[in-house]
Image: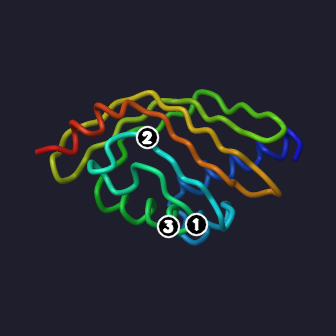
Amino acid sequence: MTIQDNLKIAHRFLEKIGSGAPREEIASLFSADLEWHIPGDAAALPWIGRKFGRGAVESFVIESGELMRRMRFDVHDVLASSDRAVILGELATVITSTEKVIESPFAIALTIAGGEISRFLMLEDSFSVAAASQP
């Protein structure tokens, strides 16, 4: 893949997530053998930890819609290489069960192979996420 192709895939991902596209449509950007990883306390929220397959994306879309309200998701940069795109920004989210706010910078690294996202790694303030999920 070219750098431009990978930038387009990253922007398509952001567009679909931001527009509230159906979970299957978002998941179609990912490979069937996707490795999904958001390091942190896997007991805090269901999408944290290491998961595999497109089902991880579909579960994230469903569960995040039920368990949190997005206040802000600001993208500052989208960078790419021949096999990766990286999205840098800041987010603010309310955990609905506690009404606590998470504010955190983030980095999302997308590894891309064959026109699909094969690995998703999101880095955020995992301490704040865990604290906000606790009553």
Q: What is the secondary structure assignment of the residue under circle 3? A: helix
Q: Residues within 10 Å of mark 1 (few under 14, many from 20)?
A: many
Give the distance between the C-alpha atoms of the residues marked 3 and 2, in whole angstroms. 18 Å
Horizontal and vertical percent position of residue 85: 71, 38
Q: Between tags 1 and 2, which lies in front?
A: 2
Q: Earlier in the sequence, mark 1 or mark 2?
A: 2
Q: Residue furthest right?
A: 2
> Quick one: quadrant of the C terminus?
top left
Identify the residue position indicated by label 2 in the image: 39
Q: Residues within 10 Å of mark 2 (few under 14, many from 20)?
A: some
In this picture the colour scheme is rainbow
Question: Residue shown at 59%/57% (left/top)?
Answer: 16
Q: Is residue 128 above or below residue 27?
A: above
**Residues tagged 3 and 1 counted as in contact (Cβ below 8 A):** yes
Q: Residue furthest left?
A: 135
Give the distance between the C-alpha atoms of the residues marked 1 and 2, in whole angstroms. 18 Å
Q: Between tags 3 and 2, which lies in front?
A: 2
Horizontal and vertical percent position of residue 69: 32, 50
Residue 80 in the figure: left or right of residue 51: right
Identify the residue position indicated by label 3 in the image: 58
- Rendering quarter of residue 115: bottom right
Q: Earlier in the sequence, mark 3 or mark 2?
A: 2
Q: What is the secondary structure assignment of the residue under circle 2? A: loop
**Residues tagged 1 and 2 counted as in contact (Cβ below 8 A):** no
Give the distance between the C-alpha atoms of the residues marked 3 and 1, in whole angstroms. 7 Å
The three-letter code of the residue at mark 3 reads Glu
Q: Between tags 3 and 1, which lies in front?
A: 1
Identify the residue position indicated by label 1 in the image: 54
The three-letter code of the residue at mark 2 reads Pro
Q: Which mark is residue 63?
A: none
